[in-house]
Image (cartoon, rainbow, N blue to C red):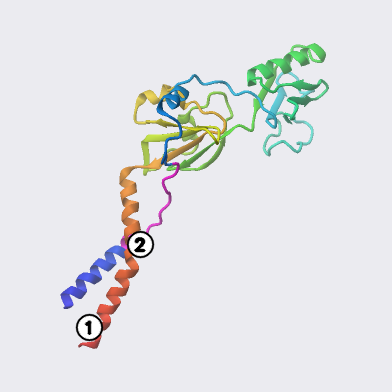
């Protein structure tokens, strides 16, 4: 009887110790039913990457690299300007009618243009109406992607330059954790009604040059756990469920032994 009691006590201690760590992540974005048929998904995934076109409510950062007289942040930061932009140019929100209002030259239609097209339009307009050989720098500063899962720093990250890649985003977020499944990195892209899941194998060197890894505004990047980490979590779940039962059983055995001494 004592040997049996000791055996259960040892098993109880093992289960208690194995459940000391906290589970950090869960598997997200599991595709339980087909989001799109395989042919249409393949077509979208392999389609060439299109440049972003400006939309209403976008926030443009505009500055004249040649002159400090116009379009510079020498005035107080306005309401739409994010913190930390001092000295980098004023920000201007695109209105619902598709125009943006800039100093002196007024309203300019920019919706539907790419960043480079809008930059050229603003530069040409200032050259025609006000400045001599202006050098305009224009950025769309509200574009962002979300990265979740087995990454050092989850969160939202701005797309600060054209054609930001998945590798660059992972580097900015501190890299993958030791639990990450680098062979199955998912990019969820598209509208809420018609999302497309693009799976990237970072274990393949060709993924570096894969056009699908060029991120688009609104993308969600999810990095799942590898099989080893998932097995560890399953064991932890098992121990969490049976730990109270083992403790109760051990207590009963101890009381039984003390009573029958």
Q: Looking at the rendering, in which quadrant would you find the C terminus? A: bottom left
Reading the image, the residue beneath label 2 is 240
Q: Residue at x 69, y 28 (%)?
A: 60
Q: In this view, does 18 lie to the left or right of 122?
A: left
The quadrant where residue 96 appears? top right
In reply to whether residue 219 is colored magenta, the answer given is: no
Along the viewing direction, whichever of 163 and 171 lies nearer the viewer:
163
Q: Is the magenta stretch mostly helix, strand or loop?
A: loop
Secondary structure beneath disc 1?
helix
In reply to whether residue 21 is colored magenta, the answer given is: yes
126 up-or-down from 261: above or below: above
Q: Earlier in the sequence, mark 1 or mark 2?
A: 2
Q: Which residue is drawn at 24% across and 83% down?
A: 256
Q: What stretch is highlighted in magenta?
A: 17-29
Reading the image, the residue beneath label 1 is 257
Q: Where is residue 24 in the image (x, y as percent from the top left)?
A: 43, 51
154 up-or-down from 109: above or below: below
Q: Is residue 172 left or right of residue 52?
A: left
Q: Is residue 113 left or right of residue 177?
A: right
Q: Where is residue 170 in the image (x, y as percent from the top left)?
A: 46, 35
Disc 2 crowd, CA 10 A, few/some/many (<14, 14-19, 20+): some
Disc 1 crowd, CA 10 A, few/some/many (<14, 14-19, 20+): few
Q: Where is residue 137 in the image (x, y as percent from the top left)?
A: 67, 21
């Amino acid at each position: 009887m004592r040997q049996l009691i000791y055996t259960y006590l040892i098993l109880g201690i093992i289960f208690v110790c194995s459940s000391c760590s906290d589970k950090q992540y869960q598997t997200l974005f599991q595709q339980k039913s087909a989001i799109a048929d395989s042919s249409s998904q393949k077509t979208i995934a392999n389609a060439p990457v299109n440049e972003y076109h400006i939309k209403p409510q976008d926030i443009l950062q505009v500055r004249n690299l040649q002159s400090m007289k116009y379009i510079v942040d020498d005035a107080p930061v306005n309401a739409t300007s994010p913190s930390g932009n001092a000295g980098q140019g004023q920000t201007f929100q695109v209105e619902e009618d598709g125009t943006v209002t800039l100093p002196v030259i007024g309203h300019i239609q920019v919706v539907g243009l790419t960043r480079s097209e809008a930059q050229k339009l603003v530069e040409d307009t200032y050259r025609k109406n006000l400045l001599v050989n202006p050098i305009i720098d224009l950025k769309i500063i509200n574009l962002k992607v979300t990265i979740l899962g087995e990454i050092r720093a989850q969160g939202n990250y701005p797309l600060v330059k054209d054609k930001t890649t998945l590798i660059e985003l992972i580097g900015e977020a501190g890299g993958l954790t030791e639990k990450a499944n680098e062979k199955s990195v998912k990019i969820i892209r598209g509208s809420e009604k018609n999302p497309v899941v693009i799976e990237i194998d970072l274990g393949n060197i060709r993924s570096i040059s894969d056009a699908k890894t060029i991120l688009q505004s609104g993308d969600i990047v999810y990095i799942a756990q590898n099989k080893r980490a998932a097995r560890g979590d399953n064991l932890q779940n098992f121990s969490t469920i049976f730990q109270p039962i083992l403790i109760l059983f051990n207590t009963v055995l101890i009381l039984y032994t003390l009573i029958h001494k």
